[in-house]
Image: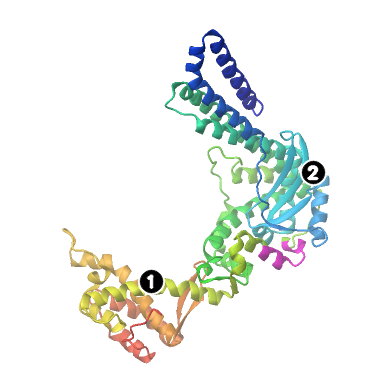
Amino acid sequence: MLVAFPSMLVVLLAVLVGAEALLLVDSVGNGLTWAIAIVPTSIIVVRGLRVLLTKVGEPVRGVPLAEHEHPRLWTLVRRLAEVCDTRPPDEIYLNDEITAVVVEETRLLGLVSTHRRMFIGAPLVADMREDELAAVLAHELAHYGHWDTRLSTLAYRGRRAFVSTVSALDRTVPFERVLAVLLNGWMRLYLRASNGLSQRQEQAADRVAARAGGAAAMAGALREIAVTTEAWRLFAEHHLVMGWDAGYLPADIFGGYAELRQSMSERLDTIRLNPPNEPRPLGTHPPVASRVADLEAMATAPAVACGQRPARELLHDAATALDAAVVRSLGPEAGDKRRADWVTLAHVHGAPRAAAAATALLTAAARLTERPATIRTVLTALDAGDLAELAGVPRMRGVGPRGRREQARPTVRGGLRATVGLAMVGVGAASWVPAWPSCARLAVDPPYEATFAGLIDAAVADRPDTTGLRALLDTANVDVDRTDVTT
């Protein structure tokens, strides 16, 4: 299949050029007429061949792990490569991915290997035991031994050439429309074949990993990868960048990540016991659960024995290396960010969001009552029964006053909590603290904490009562007539 597509393009190009030559010999007029369709199609085919033959230059992402700095890791990789009957990588990098990957630079469409690189995800090093990571690395090294990395390069180029050729064809031209239909059918067949090949490669690599690192360790690693995928994606998308807009990054990235995992322990345990088993359409990997079941049925002892110490002990100064790998993945701007503790990050994350909710409520109260935008104005509007109006809930046919209040209550409750919370933070009676698995929460000081939520609820009830909330604010020395609560 890999060879057939470029061969087909060459044959197609020869047919097009030959047909045009015959047409010109037979009749110059006919030749020029057909050239309108044949020449553009020939150009498209030539472009497809050029894509197939052109190397794809991708930047190397990650922190290099030099052998003299991380000898334990390199010793392990070399031992595993020997068992896998392949040459070890020339370079190893640590990046922020939730996986390990090997790549190979080649010449002559993958026939000659020139340079090998291994990439290891920092989240895996942070989460796994040494024996689990060893099994994962053996799995990746097995791809070298089976020529998977060389074939995958050719398969990738083939897919790019397919897409480039088919997308360039003009469906309004009958000749090119017929060619597009033929190539689309071939491409679907090609993708099924190449993805089926990829799945068989993964299963073969699992068997090698079971022999080199142990079946139990590889099965445990697959379970842990499913867990890490869930936890790290949540952490990277929210917690890692929670202070980004304010110019901050966490000073202790993996300390916070450990807190997040601890807060999600029950959920992660469920994933660990029941890894994903849903096949993906045209997926390159078999379902995790089926791979785990196959491995656990093998019960193969490891050829390279490793302990169950944390995998991070394979690295020298692991904390620095893991941190550098994640920060570098965030791009050049990350170097300009200040490093802050999680309490500071909670404040810079929570305060602006609270300010936005408070501003909306204060503005609505001021517009409704034609008074200054203060806490007193908000409380006065609530006492007057203007809950729905504060949230901007319109009057609609079939929706009575109670229905409008139910629609408005969550918005007003959130805005009131934000407004009062900001005011209490301003007088030192509350603060923003880290919260796991959420990013930050408002922590009200003990004298007021027990009644705070109940008083907010009372103020937005069907029969509003702001007396208790006013008393709390007075006791906390909050000026309810301030117009700059959100600053």
Which residue appears at 44% of the width and 21% of the height? 174
- Give the structural element (helix, strand or loop) at label 2: loop
Q: Do the residues labelled 2 and 1 touch (CB within 8 Å)?
A: no
Give the residue type that dot 1 points to: Ala
Which residue appears at 74% of the width and 55% of the height? 131
Does residue 94 appear in this view? yes
Closer to the camera in the image, 148 or 58: 58
How many residues crowd around disc 2 within 10 Å: few (fewer than 14), some, or many (20 or more)? many
**Residue 58, position in %: x, y?**
65, 47
- The numbered mark at residue 463 is none
| 2 or 1: tag closer to the N-terminus | 2
Q: In this view, does 23 lie above or below 75?
A: above
Q: Is residue 70 above or below residue 457?
A: above
**Residue 130, position in %: x, y?**
74, 58
Q: Does the magenta stretch include residue 74?
A: no
Closer to the camera in the image, 379 or 115: 115
Q: Is residue 321 magenta?
A: yes
**Residue 267, position in %: x, y?**
53, 60
Apparent side of residue 383 relative to residue 145 in the rendered image (left or right): left
Does residue 196 appear in this view? no
Q: Is the magenta stretch mostly helix, strand or loop?
A: helix
- The numbered mark at residue 84 is 2
The C terminus is located in which quarter?
Answer: bottom left
How many residues crowd around disc 1 within 10 Å: few (fewer than 14), some, or many (20 or more)? some
All told, the count of numbered labels is 2
- Give the CA distance from mark 2 to mark 1: 58 Å
Q: In this view, does 425 lie above or below 87?
A: below
- The numbered mark at residue 356 is 1
